Each structure stands twice: as structure tokens, then as C-alpha cells.
Amino acid sequence: MDEKDRLILDVLKENSSLSHREIAKKTHIPLTTVHNRIKKMQKEKLIKKYTIQLDSEKLGLGLAAYIMVTVNQHIAGKKISQQEIAKLIKKFSCVESADIVTGQTDLLVKVRCANIKDLDNFITKDLRSIEGIDKTISMIVLEEI
């Protein structure tokens, strides 16, 4: 990866819906070069997917929170992995991410909810009902930068 690739990726990170022609104009890189380099980065799986950034407020999901989850992997004689629990958590529509982390907790879950009541329902009824979840600590986001 060289400087041209980095320029192309910087533009794509800002707006992945731009055409190759628009990227070429912004980066001052020839159109065919932009096209070929993007194809190569896709083939090499450097670019995995294109996505969108939603306005959570307009979607009625103005409350963001992080939930630190501690896992008890040994339940009733069977072992459940952090990966299995993270996959179960990711199935809920309010969950943006569920990541395995180091430190005092095992998982860090980011959620978006309409309000505190929805967050409370998710934590108490959905999240804590998953077998293997030992405890949770929640942090509400005050401002996203």
C-alpha cells in the first residue's frame, strides 16, 4: 500500500458512495488508476465492504450506551465461549457492536435505544437472560464527538 492507496482510502472513508470519477478528482489521481487500485484492494480484502452512517436521532434512537459484560464460561457443566455469547448479543436490533476485550470485563457492547426505558428493557430482559452472562455495567453516552 502506498500514498495513492491511502489517499483513495481516505476519500472512501469520508464518503464511500462517491464514483471513481469523483474520487479521481478529489485525489488528483487518474481515473483508471483509481479504478484499478480499488479493484485490487477489494480483491485483496483490504476493502471488506461499503456501508452507511445513519442519523440515529432521526431514526428515533437518540440514546447510545456502552455495556461492559462479564461472562461466566462454565455453566451447568458445559463451557460457553465469549464468541458464542457475542454472536447471540449481536442478534438484537439495538446492538451496534459486541467486541471481546481485555481487562476486567469480557465484552464491550454498544447499543442504540430510543430512551432509558428501552435500554433498561434490553439489559434486564434480553441481555441478562442470555446464559453465560454474569454481570453488566452500563455507561450512557452524553455526547458523541
Image (spheres, helix red, strand yellow):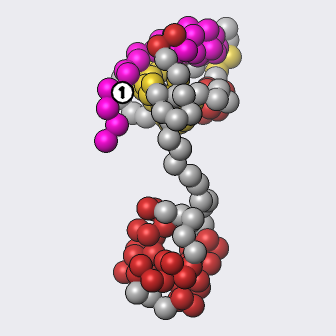
In-front residue for pair 14/124: 14
Answer whether residue 40 is visible to the viewer in this image. no
Instruction: Estimate the x, y position of residue 31 in percent, counting from the top left.
Output: 54, 88
Position of 6 compared to 125: left or right?
Answer: left
Residues packed near mark 1 inside 10 Å, few (<14), some (14 to 19) or many (20 plus): few
Q: Is residue 95 above or below residue 18?
A: above
Residue 100, percent from left and from top: 49, 34
Vertical order, 93 against 17 (above or below): above
In the foreground, 82 or 69: 69
Tell me residue 138's x, y (percent): 41, 17
Image quadrant containing the C terminus: top left
Would you name the residue on which mark 1 appears? Answer: 141
Q: Is 24 colored magenta in this rendering?
A: no
Residue found at x 67% / y 8%: 76
Image quadrant in which you'd find residue 43 = bottom right
Q: What element carries label 1?
A: loop
Over which residues does the magenta segment extend?
Answer: 118-145
Is residue 127 covered in magenta?
yes
The number of discs equals 1
At horizontal 56% and vertical 52% (from top left) the residue drawn is 52
Type of amino acid under label 1? Val
Q: Residue at x 58, y 75 (%)?
A: 19
